[in-house]
Amino acid sequence: MEKTFFIIKPDGVRRSLVGLVLERAERRGFSIEKLQMCEVTRDMLDQHYADLVDKPFYHEIVSYMLSGPVVIGVMTGGDVIHSWRKMMGATNPSDALPGTIRGDFAHASDDGSVENIVHGSDCAASAQREIALWFD
Ligand code: IDP
Ligand code: MG
């Protein structure tokens, strides 16, 4: 069965949206295979977002992702990688459609940060890499 890696980011935990996010996944028919609350370290974040560390906005990602505890997990199901990305919605909450997690529960910030509640692996190779990084 296909697996994807997800994070309920600090804003999701802070706003008590953990149950709601997991419920959406489970209602869709996906199974939560692993689930853990944790504090992200700078080192883990740099590895997780290795493709973004050189971006000018990376400091925004760091202060956002280190601003509080997160919930990390693995979920399984048919086409879960692509389907979970669709359920999350567009990266920028301004572009995220109603009906998606980001479109229903996030909005654009005015300080440059992009706080969007959830992460999901973007392809099979990322899912494999991220699951190994966070759970091995
Ligand atoms: P994704 O989470 O939809 O896959 P990515 O482009 O992989 O989007 O970016 C990772 C995360 O970095 C985003 O979810 C968001 O929190 C943050 N981010 C992306 N672009 C920007 C930006 O331009 N400014 C600030 N933060 C950003
Ligand atoms: Mg991404």
Image: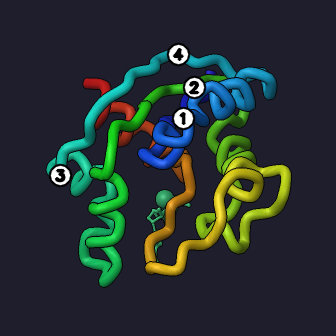
Quadrant containing the C terminus is top left
Which residue lies under the disc numbered 1?
A: 4
Image: 108 above or below 38: below
Element type at marker 4? strand
Residues under labels 1 and 2: Cα distance?
Answer: 6 Å
- Which amino acid type is marked by label 2? Met
The picture places residue 92, in percent across and down from the top left corner, at: 61, 70
Sequence order check, earlier mark of 4 and 2: 4
Image: 53 above or below 6: below
- Answer with left or right where residue 34 lies relative to residue 66: right
Sequence order check, earlier mark of 3 and 1: 1
Asked whether residue 123 appears in the rendered view, the answer is: no
Which residue lies under the disc numbered 3?
A: 42
- Which amino acid type is marked by label 1? Thr
Sequence order check, earlier mark of 3 and 2: 3
Element type at marker 2? strand
Disc 3: CA contacts within 10 A as few (<14), some (14-19) or many (>=20) = few
The reply to whether the C-beta atoms of the residues labelled 1 and 2 are less than 8 Å apart is yes
Image: 43 above or below 3: below
Which image quadrant is residue 17 in? top right
Residue at x 55%, y 41% (from the top left corner): 15
Which residue lies under the disc numbered 4?
A: 33
Residue at x 68%, y 30% (from the top left corner): 20
Residues under labels 4 and 1: Cα distance?
Answer: 10 Å
